[in-house]
């Protein structure tokens, strides 16, 4: 995965009812997201930022050295740039307080989903990351995946129905 500054789209304002696939890597790609004492506080702070900037977390997956998020703005005022910045800032602050070191690499990666990109396709990609990495055989067996919009069971059923 690239580590430089990918930059934001120049002709896009990142405001409103858009969906985004986001990836944030840990500082120096360290293996940090392997226990609940690291993942749970980070997720709580991302949820805090999502509430503040009116984003729904459709799917998430904390891999050992990075995080995938699928989020959707819930109002015309939903500001993705602010959400991304605050999610990383809040989670990073609490991580540094608890562990004394930096959590995130400086830049993340975002992809604005276009109309022809189905949310379930991206959710499937995110949720199946631990399977592709050889960490588990079933999504349900990985402790650091989920959704705050749907139950994991319902989201996986929707993905399976679409794939059938």
Image (tube, rainbow, N blue to C red):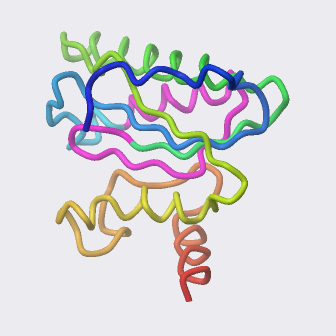
Considering every residue shown, the one lying at the far front of the view is 11
The structure residue drawn at horizontal position 22% and vertical position 22%, both measured from the top left corner, is 27
The stretch drawn in magenta includes residue 50: yes
- Magenta-drawn segment: 40-67
The quarter of the picture where the C terminus appears is: bottom right
Find residue 106 and report its horizontal and vertical position in percent. Answer: 33, 15
Asked if residue 155 lies left or right of residue 139, the reply is right
Q: Position of residue 123 (x, y in %)?
A: 52, 59
Task: Tell me what residue is drawn at x 28 percent, y 20 percent.
Answer: 105
Q: Residue furthest right?
A: 76
Q: What is the quadrant of the N terminus in the image?
A: top left
Quick one: 3 or 155, which is closer to the camera?
3
Q: Where in the figure is residue 52, as x and y percent of width and height?
A: 68, 21
Q: Is residue 114 left or right of residue 85?
A: right
- Name the quadrant containing residue 135: bottom left
* 158 relative position to 68: left or right: right
Residue 65 vs 45, above or below: the answer is: below
Q: How many numbered callouts?
A: 0
Q: Nearer the viewer, residue 11 or 72?
A: 11
Q: Is residue 108 magenta?
A: no
Residue at (37% x, 32% y) in the render? 24
Residue 158 drawn at (x, y percent):
61, 75
Against 97, residue 57 (above or below) is below
Residue 79 shown left or right of residue 85 in the figure: right
Residue at 52 percent across and 52 percent down: it is 59
């Amino acid at each position: 995965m690239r580590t430089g500054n990918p930059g934001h789209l120049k002709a896009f304002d990142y405001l409103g009812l858009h969906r985004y696939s986001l990836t944030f890597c840990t500082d120096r790609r360290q293996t940090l997201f392997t226990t609940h004492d690291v993942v749970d506080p980070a997720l709580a702070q991302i949820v805090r930022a999502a509430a503040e900037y009116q984003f729904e977390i459709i799917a998430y997956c904390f891999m050992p050295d990075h995080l995938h998020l699928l989020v959707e703005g819930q109002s015309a005022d939903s500001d993705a740039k602010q959400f991304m910045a605050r999610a990383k800032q809040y989670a990073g602050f609490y991580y540094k307080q608890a562990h004394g070191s930096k959590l995130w690499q400086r830049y993340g990666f975002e992809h604005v989903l276009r109309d022809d990109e189905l949310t379930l396709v991206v959710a499937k990609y995110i949720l199946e990351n631990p399977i592709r990495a050889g960490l588990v055989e079933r999504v349900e067996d990985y402790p650091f995946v989920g959704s705050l919009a749907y139950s994991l069971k319902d989201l996986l059923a929707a993905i399976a129905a679409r794939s059938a």
